[in-house]
Image (cartoon, rainbow, N blue to C red):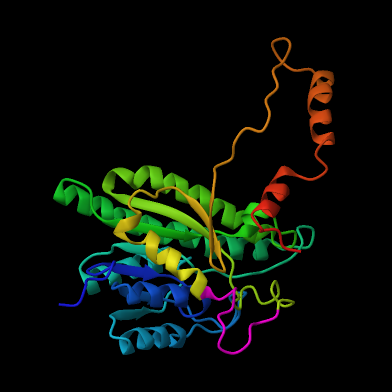
Amino acid sequence: MPPSLPLDGLSAIVTGAGRGLGRAEALELARLGAAVVVNDYGQPGRDGSGSASAAPAEEVVADIRAAGGRARAHLGDVSDHEQARELVELAVSAYGKLDILVNNAGILRDRMIFSMSEDEWDAVIRVHLKGHFNTTHFAAAHWRSRSKEVGGPVYGRIVNTSSEAYLAGSAGQPNYAAAKGGIVGLTTSTALALAKYGVTANAICPRARTRMTEDVFAGLQEPADGMLDALAPEHVSPLVGYLASPAAAGVNGQLLVVHGGMVAIVERPRVAAKFDAAKETFTFAELDELITPYYADRPRNETFAAAEVLGLKRE
């Protein structure tokens, strides 16, 4: 018998899997043995514009099947609560259960904060943050129900997609940065809530050359033929496969940066300095005396300094 694969017998959903990172992640999970539901709304515009199309998801399904794997396509908008429910139900009905959820779907509507419209804000928050919530909600309900049925933990893995825009800031993406920060909060909350059911939830900050990042990496030369691009999504997908596997049972509520053969585990925020009031509460003068000199010695925000250490700061 051939050796078993890490994800044999498991089923997965990957959202936004018709192109870019999601496509690479769906192919990797299938390569590792998972049966995959490939979700993609199929709109051609990275801002969420254009008519929905099943073609991107169906093409990935065809690639998985051609390689000997199992896959189903789902044309649906994960920001729609009902369509997210249908997505989870499809995985359960097709494969008997859901084991892995990879949330990747997203759009961009970049604008400086003083120019951004309400619709540009709402659209990005809806697709990224609400989309992550919607699928997580129904997957979590499925795992909780299964856990009650068996009287103990079940297998469940969530891999969410945050961004360096949350870690280091992104001046022209206040909606995107806010959504990605919210996803980290959603992830850590979910990790705490579902741990007793056997489910883990982690988030990644990937850096990859896709249609979502074509402007960011426009000045970076692509490699010569035959060489793997340092920004290829294929550098990100192995980490997703690992986090989805039984090997990562001890990894929960974590944020990991990944790109170009590098993985960095990001610590949760720590207290950098602490000041105590001389009396019951602070006065303005006392705060000025304590805090102003502290920041005077730090010409740049600590967040950006930390980002540069990790090699995350983008010009």
* Residue at point 58%, 57% (across, down): 179
Name the image quarter holding the C terminus.
bottom right
| 10 sits to left or right of 285 | left
Name the image quarter holding the N terminus.
bottom left
Give 87 or 219, whichever is nearer the viewer. Answer: 219
Q: In this view, does 15 lie above or below 43?
A: above
| Main secondary-structure element of the magenta-colored stretch | loop
What is the span of residues highlighted in magenta in the rendered image?
221-233
| 216 sits to left or right of 141 | right
| 125 sits to left or right of 290 | left
Instruction: Identify the image quadrant of residue 57.
Output: bottom left
* Residue at point 71%, 76% (across, down): 220
Q: Position of residue 277 (x, y in %)?
A: 72, 15
Instruction: Identify the image quadrant of residue 207.
Output: bottom right
Q: In this view, does 56 lie above or below 258?
A: below
* Residue at point 63%, 83% (across, down): 223
Q: Position of residue 199 (x, y in %)?
A: 32, 51
Q: Position of residue 21 (x, y in %)?
A: 51, 73
Q: Is residue 54 magenta?
A: no
* Residue at point 24%, 74% (across, down): 94
Q: Is residue 230 magenta?
A: yes
Q: Is residue 15 above or below residue 132?
A: below
| 80 sits to left or right of 10 | right
Q: Position of residue 219 (x, y in %)?
A: 74, 77
Give 147 or 27, whichever is nearer the viewer. Answer: 27
Give 17 or 235, whichever is nearer the viewer. Answer: 235
